[in-house]
Amino acid sequence: MGILLHPVAPGARRAGRVAHREDHRGWMAAALALVLWACMAGLAHAAALRASEVPPSLRPWVPWVLQDHETIACPAAYNDPDRHECVWPARLTLALGAQGGHFSFDVEVFAPDTLVVLPGQAEAWPHSVRANGRVLTMTESGGRPAVRLPPGHFVIEGAFEWREMPQGIALPPNTGLVDARRDGQPLGWPDSGGQLWLRPRPEAAAPTEPETLTVRVFRRIDDDIPLLVTTRIELIASGRPREVRVPAALLPGFVVLGVSSPLPARLQPDGALRVQLRAGTWNLDVQGRSHSPVGALAAPGGEEVWSFAARNDLRIVDLQPAGGTVSVDPRQAGVPSDWDDLPAFHMPGGASLKLAERRRGDPEPEADKLSLDRTLWLDFDGAGFTARDAIHGTISRSWRLDAVPGLAVGRVSIGGQEQFITRLPAPDAGSGVEVRQGNAQIEAESRIGFAHALPVTGWQADFDRVSIDLRLPPGWRLLHAGGADTVAGSWIARWTLWDFFFVLLIVAASWKLHSRPAALALAGALALTWHLAGAPTWPWLLLLALSALRAALEARTGERARRVAWWVRLGWRATLAAIAIALLPFAVGELRAALYPALEGTQAYERSARVVTGAIE
């Protein structure tokens, strides 16, 4: 694919003439100003004033300023700066017995008149509550005992009395440490709802439904190296919780790779699976691999459904069922949904499935299927390109990816892992990497010297699809890109048949009404500025139409013709003035961009991100 780049002419937008000395001075000044600004910004920081730092004349106003914003002094949550925690519970000590008990609660309060929830509930309401020895007035919050405290550190103490020990005590939320004892013996940790249980929880009522169990076994055979068998066990149970044993969860001669179960389960040495079962429908997976070549598989007992996943790239086998094995429809047999595209077999007890090998290996593997997404950044001085390549697809033949000699590879990663860049001993060999994964996810960064014609890929590999995003610095525009199926954003690609028609119409009218040099000059100006924002285009057609009409009227005699000619001249002058007014800011902007291309804006590199997108199928 050929790519032709050129700086825009001085009369067009973003012209390429650059005063290099002024450009470098401007860049150095801008960089120095940016560094100084960053340093000053790094030294500045915002911090809240402490109470002692408030001027004495303003201190009486502090309560008025903080009214309705008392929680601003509280620590903010780590993940939400707008949520403040004004109560910091530390340690809660509970000493309880058959007739009551007492508690000690260590808290830190950060805001005035803060509500602090205490341990207890309606059937275990605390009394004689004190904070640092001072008696407190109790209040209620959501059915829970609470007190209101000013900012500070407090040790809250209180007592409980009951005729019969409650089932449990509700603890304050977010309590850090809990030391709870009953008659001197430590109690367990509170549950997720903050409930501390003082007595054993009431047992659930015995199930009234009968104990039933339905077991369905599905196996998936992956003809991999080594052979893999995934056993899906479906348990449908009712009744009370119990332990069950599922035999032959792992086939004989296989080594377990993993067990996936939502229930507590353990694989026995004989391949059986022990499960702590409860009511419901459960799916358990057991995966194993063979430790020797397998020529046939036998069903261990009972009725099962087997699915076979062939790997024709490794070997081709013929399935020979025996002992009552019958081919079935996967969907009607109820196999797992992610297996229903595989051939399925109904396997009664004692049935077998023989794997007769016809061919091993693949002498003619499929061609590599790769796609390349490349992003090119042209240097500011046009000396070369920086390339970032994203290569995706499958590799089945070539296990090394080499660059063409003109591509200087700097970094390559495969699957997110950085790779060593090596070079083969051949004199014309380029840099490359070894690719050992069939599913390629490759990212590479490299440098390319400037050339008007660039290689399509830059890699010694065949690609099914290639797309290129060319990003140009200020002062550069893409003239044309050849060899691509589709090109967007180049100067030539932006011209449509409608544009050609109107430009030719304007030039032809200027040729007819004015001189040949004027028509050629107008043709060049329109060709360079037709697609630029702010350039006057359509007013030229109106101006030429008025010129033709004025010439025709001036050739006539008569009062009416003179009056119409006067209005036409007025319209011609107004149109000419409008063109001049539009050209003035446009010309100033173009001249400024020609002298200092960097003034186009810091986002010029990003705005041209989709200048050209080529796809080679």
Image (cartoon, grey):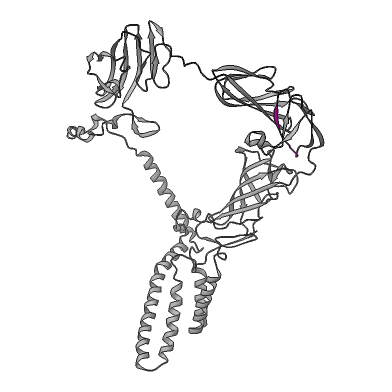
Which quarter of the figure has residue 119?
top left
**Residue 351 painted magenta:** no
Judged from this view, the residue extending furthest toward the bottom is 557
- All told, the count of numbered labels is 0
Task: Work out whether residue 417 or residue 517 is closer to the camera in this orientation and state it.
Answer: 417
Is residue 518 depicted above or below 27 in this figure? below
Q: Position of residue 561 (x, y in %)?
A: 37, 90
Is residue 600 depicted above or below 166 in this figure? below
Figure quadrant of the C terminus: bottom right
Which quarter of the figure has residue 339?
top right
Residue lying at 50% horizontally and 77% vertically, measured from the top left:
506
Residue lying at 62% horizontally and 54% vertically, measured from the top left:
449
Task: Work out whether residue 88 or residue 127 is closer to the camera in this orientation and state it.
Answer: 127
Is residue 447 depicted above or below 580 in this figure? above
Question: Which region of the structure is painted magenta?
Answer: 301-313
Which quarter of the figure has residue 493?
bottom right
Task: Work out whether residue 457 or residue 571 is closer to the camera in this orientation and state it.
Answer: 571
Q: Position of residue 36 (x, y in %)?
A: 39, 45
Figure quadrant of the N terminus: bottom right
The answer to whether 130 appears left or right of 285 in the picture is left
Is residue 79 depicted above or below 392 in this figure? above
Q: Position of residue 218 (x, y in %)?
A: 67, 29
Residue 607 appearing in the image: yes
**Residue 306 painted magenta:** yes
